[in-house]
Image: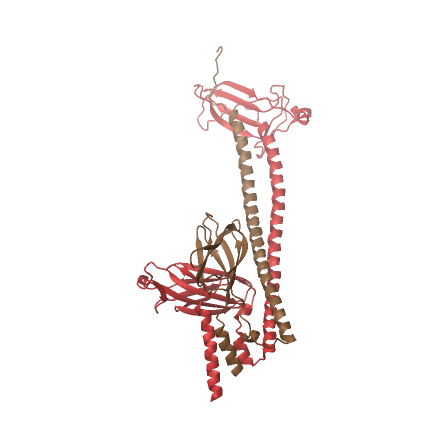
Chain colours: A red, B brown
Amino acid sequence: MVAITMQFTLYLVLLLNIYNSFVSALYFHIGETEKKCFIEEIPDETMIIGNYRTQLYDKQKEEYLPATQGLGMFVEVKDPDEKVILSRQYGSEGRFIFTSHTPGEHQICLHSNSSKFALFAGGMLRVHFTIQVGENTNNYAEIAAKDKLSELQLRVRQLMEQVDQVQKEKNYQRYREERFRQTSESTNQRVLWWCIVQTLILVAIGFWQMRHLKSFFEIMVDVDDRNDWKECIDFGGVRLPTGYYFGASAATGDLSDNHDIISMKMYQLMVEHTPEEDNQDWTKIEPSVSLLKSPKDNIDEHAPHWLEGLPASSVCSAGNRGVRRSWYR
Amino acid sequence: MLAWFVLLCAQLMFGWVRASELTFELPDNAKQCFYEDITIGTKCTLEFQVVTGGHYDVDCRLEDPDGTVLYKEMKKQYDSFTFTASRNGTFKFCFSNEFSTFTHKTVYFDFQVGDDPPLFPNENRVTALTQMESACVSIHEALKSVIDYQTHFRLREAQGRSRAEDLNTRVAFWSIGEAFILLVVSISQVVLLRSFFSDKKTTTTRVGS
């Protein structure tokens, strides 16, 4: 009988101890629709106990009183992969426990679920909140009572728990360091690739610009003789040999018609030649347009000097006479 | 049994001592305050560190129940402040990110009130601890500081990792952006130069027929 009473009082005192942890903890204010999140970066297989207690501001008495029954808090816990591992609604006072299975940043979010907005009436809710992690979750008094440990044994048990926590944290540190190293190596690789790619782009663009700017070819047409020149064709990368002729041809389909070519003017824009360009034989250049396939076969025929060098810009005006033939068939 | 009973009652009588360690996210232009009821004469320590975000700094302010500012620092990355409560009441400490326009910060703080609760209340008993017990106590204290250092190291590592990941993203965006700009600039250079040679209206003077 005495033993039972003693045991009862023992557990009562234990409960009072637990209650005491609620009574005066750190607290903060939270608005009605506000969600407060806390982050806990923990290794795997670590237990976390969270205790909270809410109080509502009473305007009449101008103090914070324990909240009414209708007011509860919604607790949501997310693991490092954004997966929800705990999502429950508790009353105005609650205690939640969870164990992590993956190491990393866990997010614990609280928000009130007030169904009646009048309860808040623009005031704030006071939330007393504590989180105990890992070794601190152990209630040594309870363990001692359950396993019937002597003082020394309890101390050693506490040391074992602490060492266990240190070990878990060290393992987590190794995992974190690997992630860090991967990120650094990825940055390093990206910088290296980008340098190479950028150099290649610069060199290619340089070559292209030089070739393109030195060799563009433009034909403008003034059909009605009104001094209004319209662009007929304009493209770059043209390479033409010297000593050839320009010709003009026309086609009218089924009807026959006359086209008069009144004049054809050629203009040459002088550019600087590189020494190797000067040394090459301008009469022997294969006519080509960069990026385009030659539409007709080139037939080699003897040609006097008529044009010199590149680039050329040609202007031609046409009337209603036919032209018999062009050079390139 | 009786010993346990006495032990637990004594523990209650000693009053509750506690440490609160939390990591929370502070959005831009926001201020977050925490309150704690402290009895007179208790030695307390507030320690905080900014883990991620912007320039890794935050404003911190600690006030006593009268409103007297005990500690105020602007744009600090980490700090530790110890004080003894001069009176009973609610002490308030606030972290502010109001100077930042778009970065939100993750702040870790550790508010220790009083010393850690002893495992047994008979620390103060008349007879001295045995050698084993005192060895255990010293190991316990050493392990506590090890865990403390580990926490600090973890926070530093998180800060470093956050910077490294920021750098990685920035390098990726910048290299793509710059390659694109290079191409655009070079093509527009060519187009512009060619436009110098395109003269739509040419004035020609006709001589003869």
Position in image of residue A261 (x %, y %): 49, 19
The one of A18 and A232 positioned closer to us in this rendering: A18
**Left or right: A244 as drawn, with respect to A322:** right
What residue is shown at x 62% (from left), y 39% (from top)?
Answer: A199
The picture places residue A103, in percent across and down from the top left corner, at 56, 63
Where residue A291 sits, quadrant-wise, is top right
Q: Residue furthest bottom?
A: A1
Location of residue B112 in the rendering, given as x and y in whole percent from the top left corner: 52, 63
- Compared to residue B190, the image places residue B160 above or below, namely below
In this orientation, which residue lies closer to the viewer: A327 or A64?
A64
Q: Quadrant of residue A57?
A: bottom left
Q: Tell me the residue at 48%/16% (across/down).
A: B204
Answer with left or right where residue B8 lies relative to residue A188: left
Residue A51 location in percent, x, y?
46, 68
Task: Judge whether residue B191 can be spotted in this image.
Answer: yes
Answer yes or no: is residue A323 visible. Answer: no
Of B66 and B118, nearer the camera is B66
Q: Quadrant of the C terminus of chain A?
A: top right
Q: Residue at x 61, y 58 (%)?
A: A177
Judged left or right of residue B127, residue B22 is left
Q: Return the residue found at the far top.
A: B208
